[in-house]
Structures are given as C-alpha cells and as structure tokens.
Amino acid sequence: MKPVVFLFLIFTFALGNAQNRNVDFVRISATISPDTLAMEIQGKVRYTFLQHSETDSIFIDGVNINIIEFRLNGRKRQVFNNGKKIGFRAPKKNGEHHVELDYVAQPVQALYFVGFNDAISGNEQIWTQGQGKYTSHWLPSFDDMNEKVEVDLKIIYFKNNEVIANGLLVDKTPIDGKLAWSFDMERPMSSYLIAFAIGKYKKQVLRSESGIPIENYYYPQEELKVEPTYRYTKRIFDFLEKEIEFDYPWQNYKQVPVHDFLYAGMENTGATLFSDSYLIDSVAFKDRNYVNVNAHELAHQWFGNLVTEESGNHHWLQEGFATYYAYLAERSIFGEDKFYWKYYDTAATLKNQSEDGNGQSLLDPNADSLTFYEKGAWALLILREQLGDQAFRQGIASYLKKYSFSNATVTDFLKEMEAVSGQNLNSFKEEWLVNTDFPYEKAMAYLYENSASIQRYQAIADAIGTTETYYKDSIMTSFWNDSTSVHLKKQFILDFHSKISDTTLSELLQAKEIMPRQYLAISRDPIFKTLKPLFESMLTDDSYVTKETVFYKLWVEFPEERSKYLNILKDEIGLPSKNIRTLWLALAMVTPSYNLVKKSGYLKELKSYTSSRYNTEVRQNAFMYLSNLKVLEGEALENLIKATNHHSWQFKTFARRMLDEELRDEDQRQRIDSLSMRMDTKDLQYLKKKIK
C-alpha cells in the first residue's frame, strides 16, 4: 500500500469522528454560475474560519459535490469527499485561515431549474429552498443551524433576467456576455437561509417607517395583481417593528413569487420566496390572500433568522412565534373579532386532535405543523395573558437582544421571560409546552373573557341546544340581528343552518355578507327549490369560492337550467387555481345541449391546463376533471406520468395516486404502455416501479 493512500485512509477515519467544535466559520464568499443546459451549478467559494485550538480535521457539508480544486491558505491540498461531507486536515496553527474550492453540483433538491424542459419561452426560473432540503446540495455549506456565517453571493447569469438573493445588491457587472450580481450580507446567518431566485420580474419598492427598503417582485404581465397581492405589506412591516420592540435586523426585505414552490412561503434571510399561486386579484383577496403568509414569513426574520432554534426540539421558537405575530398583525388590520374567532377555530381543531389521541408536545421535534404553528400560537397568547403586555414585550426584546445572530433553546427563552416578569413559568411550561393534550377548557375561558361575540355565540348555542322554542324563525332572526359580527354569523350558519327554515335563511342572507353566504353554500346539501333563488343570487357574489360551490350545486340539482348557469359564468376564471374555469369546462363538456360545436375546444383547453406551464393547483384540478370524465389521454396522460417525478412532494403524491387509479383500468393501462414507449426514461421512474 502506498504511504499517501495509507495516510489518506487514516485521515478519512479521523474525519468521520471529528467535529467542528474547535473551529468557527465566520464568512462565505461564493460565486455561483447556473448552467441551464447541464442543469448544474458551477461555483467558487472562499471560507474564512477561526481555529481556536488544535484539532485533527475540519469538514464542510456538500451533497454530491464534485470538487475541482481545493486550497487551504492559498495552497492546494488533498480533500476527502464522501458525497456528503468535504473534509481536510486542520492547519497546525490556530488563528484565522482561508479555504477556497472550485466545484460543480447537480442538485436533486434544494435548488430547482423550472421551465427549462418545455417549449414555452419566458417562464424559466431558478430558485432555492434550503430549509428541510439542505443548501449543501448546491453550495458547500453547513447543515447545522448552529454554524452561523456572514454570506456574500455573486451570481452570474444571462442579461434580461432579474437575480434576487439575500442582502444588499452592491454591484452588477457585465462578464462574458452575462451579468454578475453581487450581494452583501452584513450579519451572520444559518446556511439553510441562503437563497436566490432568477427569472423575469419587475418590482414595487416601498420603504418602512424605519427606512428599510421593501422590494415586492412580480411577473411583468401581472402588474394589476401587485396591489391586492402585497396589500398591507408596509403596514405589516411597521406593525411588527413596533410590536416586537426590536429593529428589523437586516439591510432590506424582498418578497419573490416563484413557480411550483414547495410551500406557501419560506423566510430566507431578508428574502422571502413564496408560491405564485398567491398572486391574486381583488376578488380573490376575499377568498385567499397573502396577508397571513406575508406577516408569518416577515415575523420569521426575528424568530428563526435573527435568533435560530438550537435543534428541532425548540421549533416552537420559530413556527409558534411566527404564527402568533402574524395573527397579531392581522388583528391590527382586520380587527379583534377575526383574531379571536381564528383562535376559536384552532382551539376546536386542537381539541379534536387531543381527543383522537394524537395530541403532541411542543417540545417534540417530530410534532406536526398543527402543533408547532397553532398550539404554539396559543401558548404565546396565554403566556402574554399571564405576564401582562409590558412584561411580555420586555421579555421578547430581551430574548432577541441576548441571542441575536445566534441560537437559543426553549429554556433560554423561558429564563428571559422569568427574569423580566419575576414569575416562575414551570407550570406554564408543563401545561402548554410539555403536555400532549391541548388545554381546551382554559383556552375557551380565555376567549369567553376577551371576545364578546364568542361569549354571545356560546349563549346562543347553549340555548338552541337545550330549548326547542329557540328553533322558531323569529328567535333565530333575533339572534342574527342582535350581532354585527360576521364571524359569529358564519359560525351560526355552519352550526344551525339545518334548524332554520329556508324562508328565514333567504331573508337572513339577503345582505351580501360574503362569509355567511359562502358557508351556507358549502354546508347546505341538497339545496331544494325553496333556496334556489338565494343560491342563484350567489352566482354574482364577490367570491370565487362561493361562485364555484353554488355553480356546481345548482348544475346538479336543476338540470333543466344548466345552460343558464353555464352562460352566467362562461367568462369567469376564478382563483389562481382556475377553480371556476376548470369546473366550467368539465360541466360544459357533459351538458348535452350546450354548445355542441365547441365541445372539442373545451376538451382541448382543459387538457392544456395539465401542462407544466401552469401551477400545480391548476394542473391538479384539470387532472381530476379529465379522470372523472374518462378522457384523460394523449398529452394530458403523458403530463400525468411526468408529474409523478415532480419536485413538489404534495403534487407528486397526488399524481402517483391518480396514476395508480388509471392503471387499474385495462384500456387506460394500454394507453399508458403505448405512451411510455416514446417518453424519456427519466420521466418513467415511478411508472416502471408500478408496472414491475
């Protein structure tokens, strides 16, 4: 065995047992060049680290990274690379050192090339998602959230695109027919929060009261959606700075919609990426808007980015806090009534989870989103009630100041709150954080004390539940007219619509309050002729969800008037999911007497919505309708097969389940076999497993 190989094996063994305990990485300066033909990243990275004491080896996380050249303090060195970690021998002397490496990465996750494999020009995007996926797939970095570094990115890409990344854009320089965008971050951050997005964008620029630039990006063709999408953004920003009583900690703030994003949004440091399904018009704003996601991701800039959880056991410090402060921001905009009724709804959901035996502790790193987000928000609501506004705010500010740009635990947080308030929080911790059951009785007692409309509603519910005379229409009308709370009326309709005569329901819902009418549309089935005029009036409500719901129910129950309903909504598109248009096309196709000449065009349009140019919600609707109508074939069926390998796990799961169903039909199985003969092998990974 050659001596070099022997030493390398010893080094490899040492690396596997070594930790970066004696080393502190303080800076990453990276130059990134995306190659859209090879779907890879070509990069150069320089790391600055401080070695505090003697150690054997040092490692950097890098998943399937091909190292071209590696230099320590300017001199080439051997490097160990096992496909997950990049290791090298530590310097003999302590102090400041530099590592440089050139590399190539072909990431299978954490960085996504979107729109490059279709024939559509102008929809190409590149974007990242580090949390839960690991930035180390495209940038050798640090998966451990406790390793915080200052990050500067230079991204080289084609002109006529916009490049957005963490930090301040300090330079934009022509280089080899492209442009180099240089971004500077002044303060340290966790590597999972490094992010960039590339695509065709324009931007709206706002400025907070404290002077922070806020950049809201949008697609050039979607300019009319800027106001409703980003409505209240500055107000949310100013509210959170004032409420948290701690200055926004980064140089600027950006929000970027991207195609087929994995989640609603992601709070990368100073640069939130979010799903472009939230690019909405003013009508859609009433059904599903970006306000809560907007506030949630912004709150993370303090809770998660400024102070980061030490491990998953402390995830409440991020998601529970962001959820709570987002609700506070919404309260400042929409009022207290919506705030308390939102907590009413989540309390009921958490109660059901506990009663089903699925309750979880907030200290469980494997808890679900309902626990971390909603139970977490409840814990903070109760903690504030226990401590009082002043002590709560002082404790939050003290916690953020002490652990700024570092990591913290739940114990760290509780100690700060105890120090400021002078209270022992052991009982709070046991009841709200450790306990797997949700303290429903205590939660409801809080709501009854603080919300007059919830208190009133409970009195109504108790009366209706025990006294038959309260079923009289006059009594129901009295209950309704006594309240100005649209949320109480929504719950009233949801719970008691079956105990109210159709005549009285029609009278109560003549006023076009969207929410109560929408909940009747959703919950009432069948309609019957007595409610037909009311439901027909809902076809013109300012709500795409209401229109979709009543359209389908009227079409089903009154077949003699199907053409009339189709004509009323023939020009409606609906939400970004095209909820009304896709339903309309499906129903128009199966209405025998409706526009016979155009039916082939309706089918062609519905099939077109299965294309990757549309967001996953649109595609999912189209796939479902085509499958239900037994016309999922040709290019649409091919699109379904391709979707089984989509980067979004939710959409991928949906596509695989649907393909499984299609394969059970022998005729459809033959069509799938025929299609697979001419498809690219990489698109057939899941199908081959099923057929085998």
Image (cartoon, rainbow, N blue to C red):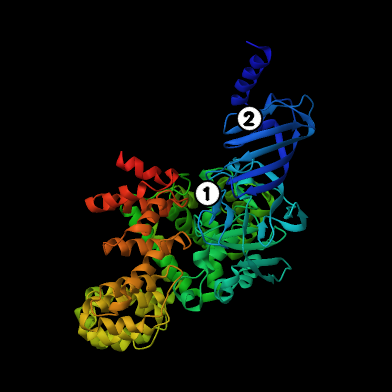
Instruction: Give the x, y percent position of residue 663.
Output: 27, 49
Q: In this view, does 226 lie above or below 670?
A: below
Instruction: Give the x, y percent position of residue 654.
Output: 37, 54
> Seen in the image, is 135 located left or right of residue 599?
right
Q: How crowded is mark 1: few (under 14 residues within 10 Å), some or many (20 or more)?
A: many
Look at label 2 and name its amino acid: Gln
Query: Which residue: 55% across, 71% down?
Result: 229
Disc on the earlier residue, 1 or 2: 2
Marks 1/2: CA–CA distance: 24 Å
- Foreground residue among 297 and 689: 689
Residue that label 2 marks:
19
- Foreground residue among 366 and 58: 58
Say if residue 535 shows up in the picture: no
Query: Which residue: 43% across, 50% down?
Result: 649
| SS label for mark 1 | loop
| SS label for mark 2 | loop
Q: In this view, does 54 lie above or below 590?
A: above
Which quadrant does the C terminus fall into? top left
Residue that label 1 marks:
315
Q: In which quarter of the image is residue 456?
A: bottom left
